[in-house]
Image (cartoon, rainbow, N blue to C red):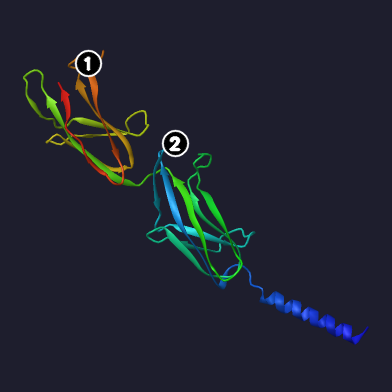
């Protein structure tokens, strides 16, 4: 066999080996970054009403190295503003994901919401927002007020202690909780998520508008970020 041919073949093999050894797989060791922000959309119990959106702090976001990896390569927690960053990455294909509740309610376990990133050069790759969902809106609000009782027998009026006050959240068909008024006739509902609320107290039907002897006296209000601590007017009831 020609010695020159053998020498060329040997040289080609060496070059291929060197090139292959220089090629870095996805993972750490490079100068690129992947950045983004994690947003959560909070819904009511059956995911029919969007209650609020906010950037999510102190929550894990995961990074998969390559297309065929069975598990994540690393993870980071989001900052106070929902932002995250994966640093010192090689060129290659990456998948970023965070866990979300399933808005179709087909899965009781969390599902992964993913975004792909292809790094082809030294760069800061911004994947934008990853949007996840939950049906446990942030509890931020309070509703307070008083129950004013009018005694039809003697014509007196006073703030009624130990009276049941009920609350319904959004499109729920019945109340989930009630509180009793204090000795000053005061009531308070705390830790309320953003949404629409119906407050009611039972009263004697002085106008005979119902076949029942008692009717609910209803007050409606909304809790939202800009108006989260609601003080209602007195609820007037009769006995």
Q: Would you say residue 188 is visible in this rendering? A: no
Does 149 sit above or below residue 144? Answer: above
In the rendered view, tell whether residue 152 sits above or below residue 88. above
Q: Is residue 47 above or below residue 213?
A: below
Indicate left or right for 218 with 96 as reference. left
**2 vs 1, front mark:** 2
Q: Residue at x 29, y 38 (%)?
A: 222
Residue under circle 2?
48
Q: Which residue is mark 1?
A: 213
At 55% from the left edge and 53% from the top edge, which residue is drawn? 114
In terms of depth relative to the viewer, which is nearer, 85 or 69? 85
Q: CA distance from mark 2 to mark 1?
A: 36 Å
Q: Is residue 46 left or right of residue 10?
A: left
Name the spot of residue 171 as percent of width and height, x first.
37, 32
> In the picture, which quadrant includes the C terminus?
top left
Residue 160: in sight, yes or no? yes
**Secondary element type, mark 2:** loop
The image quarter containing residue 49 is top left
Tell me whether circle 2 and circle 1 mark residues in contact (CB < 8 Å): no
Left or right: 73 in relation to 239: right
């Amino acid at each position: 066999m020609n010695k020159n041919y053998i020498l060329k073949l040997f040289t080609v093999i060496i070059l291929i080996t060197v090139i292959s050894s220089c090629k870095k797989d996805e993972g750490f060791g490079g100068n690129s970054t992947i950045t983004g922000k994690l947003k959560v959309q909070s819904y009511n119990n059956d995911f029919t009403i969007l209650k609020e959106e906010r950037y999510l702090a102190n929550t894990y976001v995961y990074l998969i190295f390559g297309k065929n990896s069975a598990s994540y390569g690393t993870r980071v927690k989001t900052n106070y503003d929902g932002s995250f960053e994966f640093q010192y990455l090689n060129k290659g294909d990456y998948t970023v994901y965070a866990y979300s509740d399933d808005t179709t309610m087909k899965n009781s376990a969390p599902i992964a919401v993913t975004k792909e990133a292809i790094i082809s050069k030294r760069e800061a790759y911004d994947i934008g927002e990853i949007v996840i969902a939950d049906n446990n809106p942030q509890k931020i609000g309070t509703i307070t007020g008083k129950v004013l009782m009018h005694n039809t027998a003697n014509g007196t009026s006073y703030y009624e202690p130990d009276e049941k006050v009920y609350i319904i959240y959004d499109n729920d068909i019945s109340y989930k909780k009630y509180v009793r008024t204090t000795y000053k006739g005061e009531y308070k509902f705390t830790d309320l998520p953003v949404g629409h609320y119906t407050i009611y107290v039972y009263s004697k039907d002085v106008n005979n508008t119902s076949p029942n002897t008692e009717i609910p006296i209803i007050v409606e209000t909304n809790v939202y970020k800009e108006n989260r601590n609601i003080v209602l007017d007195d609820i007037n009831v009769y006995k």
